[in-house]
């Protein structure tokens, strides 16, 4: 992957920037592949490359690969043992491309050479210290900033944040409470949303009535329509999610307008993350979460949003 950027820069005849927005840039670490465009048989200039992920390690060097596995990708909850004691394997990939023949016992000197090479590369590219934790890295209670927030409040019609930085709601019970001002003649548009067309949620007003949409990879997509039209003037629009307590994250969504019931529906599945698209207040700016407004651009809210408050229960 690190070879892609220098390849693009060379192909476009653009020098790597020394500074971006006042920040001095690190040197380009990759090797441009442009030399191979007109010479498929040219000698490979990528002669070595380290790999490390959750202390699973490997080093490639001039046709040889040494690898050490610690943990499995589907075992996310724990790492037992000491990764420094995990066994290493050795393969001569120039002759054994599928890594079928482990030569570690047969050639311990070569293995030791590659292990030392890995440490040198790890120091050079800031891989150290090695950290075997997996799910623990996602545990918000371990953050140096303290316990995670349970309440969030945003103001106005123009909020845009990366989805992980916005309010983290599902599959936990929560409320969304929007204080809005509906102009004469009514208002439509997105109050708040997070995610995109493949996975996400959206609280929006259409034809004067509130709606809640939850999209989850076409296996639990639900639109809950409101039954009460928003009156003109200051209005409190609220949703409440009551989880069922099942692994799928299912639960009931209730809608309220000025504290009066205004619709109810069932979510069969929910997620704790909703993809790469942002959390927003006042619009849905990239791909539409709800098919009901997918042909209406950003579907910006035409009233005034005073504030939107999110609270875990």
Image (tube, rainbow, N blue to C red):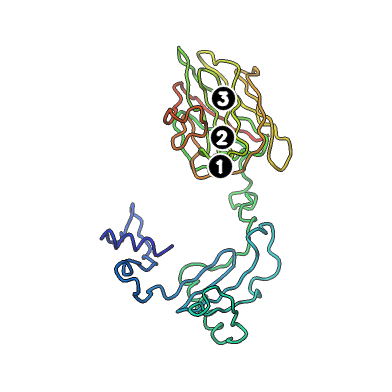
Which callout, 3 or 1, points at the residue further toward the start of the chain? Answer: 3
Residue 9 placement: quadrant: bottom left
Q: Nearer the viewer, residue 146 or 240?
A: 240
Q: Nearer the viewer, residue 10 or 152?
A: 10
The quarter in which the C terminus is drawn is: top right
Is disc 2 placed on a helix, strand or loop? strand
Structural crowding at the residue carrying mark 3, measured as other residues with C-alpha within 10 Å and reported as few (<14), some (14–19) or many (≥20): many
Which callout, 3 or 2, points at the residue further toward the start of the chain? Answer: 2
The quarter in which the N terminus is drawn is: bottom left
Considering every residue shown, the one lying at the far right of the view is 245
Distance, label 3 to label 1, CA atoms, is 19 Å
| Badge number at residue 274 | 1
Is disc 1 placed on a helix, strand or loop? loop
Query: Looking at the picture, does residue 277 appear above or below residue 263?
Result: below
* Picture coordinates of residue 77, whole percent (x, y): 69, 57
Is disc 3 placed on a helix, strand or loop? strand
Question: Dots 3 and 1: beta carbons under 8 Å?
Answer: no
Residue at mark 2: 201
Residue at mark 3: 211
* Picture coordinates of residue 121, whole percent (x, y): 48, 73
Which callout, 1 or 2, points at the residue further toward the start of the chain? Answer: 2
């Amino acid at each position: 992957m690190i070879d892609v950027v220098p390849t693009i820069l060379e192909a476009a005849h653009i020098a790597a920037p020394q500074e971006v927005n006042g920040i001095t840039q690190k040197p380009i670490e990759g090797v441009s592949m442009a030399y191979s465009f007109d010479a498929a048989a040219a000698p490979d200039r990528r002669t070595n490359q380290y790999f490390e992920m959750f202390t699973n390690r490997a080093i490639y060097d001039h046709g040889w690969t040494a690898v050490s596995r610690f943990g499995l990708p589907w075992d996310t909850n724990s790492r037992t043992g000491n990764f420094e004691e995990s066994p290493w394997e050795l393969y001569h990939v120039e002759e054994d491309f599928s890594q079928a023949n482990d030569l570690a016992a047969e050639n311990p000197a070569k293995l030791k050479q590659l292990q030392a090479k890995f440490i040198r590369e790890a120091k050079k590219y800031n891989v150290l210290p090695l950290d075997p934790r997996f799910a623990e890295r996602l545990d918000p209670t371990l953050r140096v900033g303290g316990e995670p927030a349970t309440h969030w409040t945003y103001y106005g019609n123009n909020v845009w944040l990366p989805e992980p930085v916005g309010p983290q709601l599902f599959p936990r019970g929560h409320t969304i409470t929007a204080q809005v001002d509906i102009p004469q003649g009514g208002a439509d548009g997105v109050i708040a949303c997070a995610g995109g067309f493949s996975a996400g949620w959206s609280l929006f007003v259409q034809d004067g009535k509130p709606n809640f949409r939850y999209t989850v990879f076409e296996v639990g997509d639900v639109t809950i329509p409101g039954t009460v039209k928003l009156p003109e003037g200051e209005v409190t629009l609220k949703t409440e999610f009551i989880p069922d307590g099942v692994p799928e994250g299912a639960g009931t969504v209730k809608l309220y307008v000025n504290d009066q019931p205004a619709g109810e529906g069932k979510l069969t599945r929910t997620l704790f993350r909703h993809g790469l698209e942002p959390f927003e207040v006042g619009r849905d700016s990239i791909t539409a979460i709800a098919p009901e407004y997918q042909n209406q651009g950003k579907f910006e809210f035409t009233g005034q949003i005073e504030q939107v408050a999110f609270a875990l229960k």
